[in-house]
Image (cartoon, grey):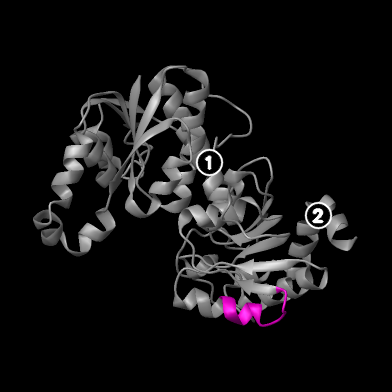
């Protein structure tokens, strides 16, 4: 059986699709997948052994210069790859109008969320068959249920298995030694943990004998990482890394502490112990999940608000106010409690 998955973005959302793919791969002997995914995220699709072909799409880039995308032949090339084979099953795992259009252009029976549960209700018009899932449950559980309905097996329960397999060539790109990774960067200002808290956490980790690495993706994130790293000679900026190198770095870390960002979701998917900090976003719906994933939720009157811009107008010493309530000492205590073996090794 040949199935096409349409899940183009974003980093964490693409990772959340892997347990559903792994369920089908484990339960159905003959199923193989093609996957339409945003060009910058294509390595994620290659990490699962059931994915044979990755079809990159560049909707984000094409939106900025649509005429150029058509004239260059990129859109035509994508359409050629999308229609190169007939599929037994097409699953739109995103539920947006843009993903529904892609699914509609492919050839095969199309499954997707119904109007009541799709992220954009009009997307449901593009599907041959529909499945409605409670929008209050976690995104991973929703996708596992959608795949189960599409393929005709009972939805698996229990801790999701992402089924990621990194090649030896990828894992060879990891840094040497024992280290922690602090994922401080994210796209929403309301998801950031105060920089002063990161400095204190880094000081606590380095004082306990750990090396700390700080990833970054743009100049603003780099400057923040530099300021955090300045507190100790055991704290280091990571070189800017492609996704394979980042995965290798995350997979061999002793633990990842992060805000609600793709790096934290990657750590959970790879089975790296992870402590993720939540304020504006809801960990019950989109939080890190996995056997070694721990979530810390801010105890604040309006959290989670699900807003990109903070609407709190009360007194606050640090911003965002909800995230400031997660004290560095408490985060470090949680971190240490989840790594007893590493703690002993570092102190020996």
Indicate the position of residue 159 as horizontal and vertical percent values: 63, 34
Q: In screen coordinates, is 282 left or right of 81? A: right
| Residue drawn at the location 69% of the way across and 61% of the way down | 180
The residue pinned by badge 1 equals 138
Q: Which residues are magenta?
A: 225-234
- For the point 25% across and 36% down, the residue is 103
Left or right, 131 with reference to 74: right
Q: Which mark, by number, is residue 342?
A: 2
Number of residues whose C-alpha sits closer than 10 Å to that of mark 2, classed few (under 14), some (14–19) or many (20 or more):
some
Q: Is residue 326 above or below residue 50?
A: below
Locate residue 232: give its quadrant.
bottom right
| Secondary structure type for disc 2 | helix
The percent position of residue 174, horizontal first and vertical second, equals: 60, 56
Q: CA distance from mark 1 to mark 2?
A: 31 Å
Q: Neighbour class for label 1 at 10 Å: few (<14), some, many (≥20)? A: some
Is residue 232 within the magenta segment? yes
Mark 1 or 2: in front is 2
Sooner in the amino-acid sequence: mark 1 or mark 2:
1
Residue at image position (35%, 19%) is 1
- The magenta stretch spans residue 348: no
Q: Is residue 81 left or right of residue 243?
A: left
- SS assignment at label 1: loop
Q: Position of residue 331 (x, y in %)?
A: 74, 63
- Contact (Cβ within 8 Å) of mark 1 with mark 2: no
Residue 277 or residue 183, whichever sits in front? 183
Residue 332 visible in rendering: yes
The residue at 88%/62% (across/down) is 347
Horizontal and vertical percent position of residue 241: 49, 63
Q: Quadrant of the C terminus?
A: bottom right
**Which of the pair 250/267 is nearer the observer?**
250
């Amino acid at each position: 059986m040949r199935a096409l998955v349409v899940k183009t973005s974003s980093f964490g959302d693409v990772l959340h699709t892997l347990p559903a793919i792994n369920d089908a791969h484990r339960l159905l002997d003959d199923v193989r997948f093609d996957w339409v995914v945003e060009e910058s995220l294509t390595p994620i699709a290659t990490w699962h052994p059931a994915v044979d072909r990755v079809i990159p799409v560049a909707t984000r880039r094409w939106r900025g210069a649509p005429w150029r995308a058509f004239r260059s032949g990129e859109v035509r090339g994508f359409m050629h790859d999308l229609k190169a084979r007939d599929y037994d099953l097409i699953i739109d795992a995103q539920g947006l109008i843009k993903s529904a259009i892609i699914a509609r252009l492919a050839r095969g029976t199309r499954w997707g969320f119904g109007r009541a549960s799709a992220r954009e209700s009009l997307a449901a018009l593009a599907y041959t068959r529909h499945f409605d899932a409670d929008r209050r449950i976690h995104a991973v559980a929703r996708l596992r249920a959608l795949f189960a309905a599409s393929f005709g097996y009972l939805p698996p329960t229990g801790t999701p298995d992402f089924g990621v397999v990194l090649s030896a060539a990828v894992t060879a790109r990891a840094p040497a030694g024992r280290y922690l990774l602090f994922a401080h960067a994210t796209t929403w200002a309301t998801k950031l943990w105060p920089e002063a808290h990161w400095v204190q956490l880094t000081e606590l980790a380095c004082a306990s004998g750990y090396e700390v690495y700080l990833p970054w993706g743009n100049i603003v994130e780099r400057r923040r990482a530099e300021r955090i790293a300045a507190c100790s000679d055991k704290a280091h900026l990571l070189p800017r890394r492609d996704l394979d190198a980042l995965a290798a770095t995350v997979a061999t870390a002793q633990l990842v502490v992060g805000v609600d960002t793709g790096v934290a979701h990657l750590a959970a998917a790879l089975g790296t112990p992870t402590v993720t900090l939540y304020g504006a976003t809801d960990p019950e719906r989109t939080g890190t999940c996995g056997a070694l994933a721990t979530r810390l939720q801010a105890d604040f009157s309006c959290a989670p608000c699900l807003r990109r811009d903070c609407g709190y107008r009360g007194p606050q010493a640090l911003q965002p106010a909800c995230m400031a309530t997660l004290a560095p000492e408490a985060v470090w205590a949680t971190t240490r409690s989840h790594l007893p073996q590493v703690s002993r090794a570092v102190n020996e």
